[in-house]
Structures are given as structure tokens and as C-alpha cells.
Image (cartoon, rainbow, N blue to C red):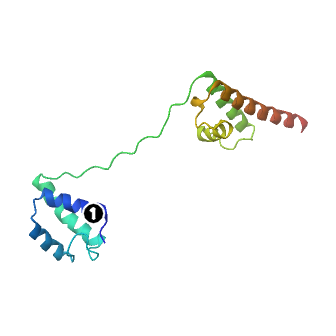
Amino acid sequence: MATASQIQKIHILKSALKIDEETYRATLAGYGAKSSKDRTFTIGKADELIQDWEPKAIAAGVYQKRKPAKKAKATRRLADDPQSKMIRALWIQLHQAGKVTDPSEAALGKFVRRMTGKDDISWLSDRDVTVVKRALKEWLEREVKDALRA
């Protein structure tokens, strides 16, 4: 059975080409279906009909093919306040010490979420910043002590 988007496109093309109901039914019968929602009207047959009508509608100037939408960039500016820079620097030091395997901002965000319940460094309150910085510093100090003992 043809997909909903194919059926919609067929009806749009039908309207654009100003095809009357009788001609439309006869055309569908030529593609092996009684109606556009008929189970015998397969995806392949619907594509054939669209490929037949679309160039005609474009040539007649009554239809324009849409370009696919561009994907939105999911980049967010990094917080650049001193506390955020300090947290990021501690995170990178832990990575360099071998205790953090992923130095990315996403991994840091997960750590911050686990510590404070907030999704981003820029949303931290002063208390939350203190909690995160203290945890990172203590983790780093443990690493230094372990390195000195070894």
C-alpha cells in the first residue's frame, strides 16, 4: 500500500494539474488500483505515478519540487565565564592524567548532570559550581597522591 506521504503528493499533483475525478480514477486503474488508498496500490506503483505527473506539473509551471530542508546545527556556545573555564581545565587535567577517557564537552556535561542534576555548565548556580569544582579537584588530588605513592 502506498505511504501517506505518497498519497498526499499524488493529491497535490492532481490538484496542481487540475485533473478531474474521472480522469484520476482512470489513471489509478491504469496503475492497478481503484483508489489511492487501495491496498493493491503499491509503493512502487505510487512512485511511478508521481514520476509521471511531477515533470508534467513542473513543465506546466504549476508545481515546484521542494529542496530537502538543511539539517540544523546543534552547536551551542561554550560558557566562557571563569568558573566554567576552571571546570573545563580540571576535566582536561583529569583526562591527561588518564582518569577521564572522554575529554569532550558532552562527557563533562554528563558528569555535571550526575553531580548537580543540571544539563549544562552555564546553568550552574554558585553552589553547584563549588560542588563540581570540589569533586574534580579532589579526584585530581587523589591521582597526584596515587602517583607519588607509586
Residue 69 image position (x, y, % from top left) = 33, 47
Q: Looking at the image, which residue is at 59% across and 23% down? A: 81
| Quadrant hosting residue 110 | top right
Q: Looking at the image, which residue is at 25% across and 72% down? A: 45
Question: What quarter of the picture does the C terminus occupy?
Answer: top right
Residue 149 image position (x, y, % from top left) = 90, 36
Left or right of residue 38, residue 99 in this image: right
Q: Looking at the image, which residue is at 47% across and 40% down? A: 74
Q: Looking at the image, which residue is at 73% across and 33% down? A: 136
| Quadrant hosting residue 97 | top right
* Residue 9 versus residue 147 in the image, above or below: below
Residue at the limit of the structure toward the right, as seen here: 149
Q: Which residue is mark 1?
A: 6
* Residue 130 versus residue 42 in the image, above or below: above
Q: Secondary structure at mark 1?
A: helix
Toward the viewer: 143 or 120?
120
* Residue 98 versus residue 23 in the image, above or below: above
Residue 3 image position (x, y, % from top left) = 31, 65
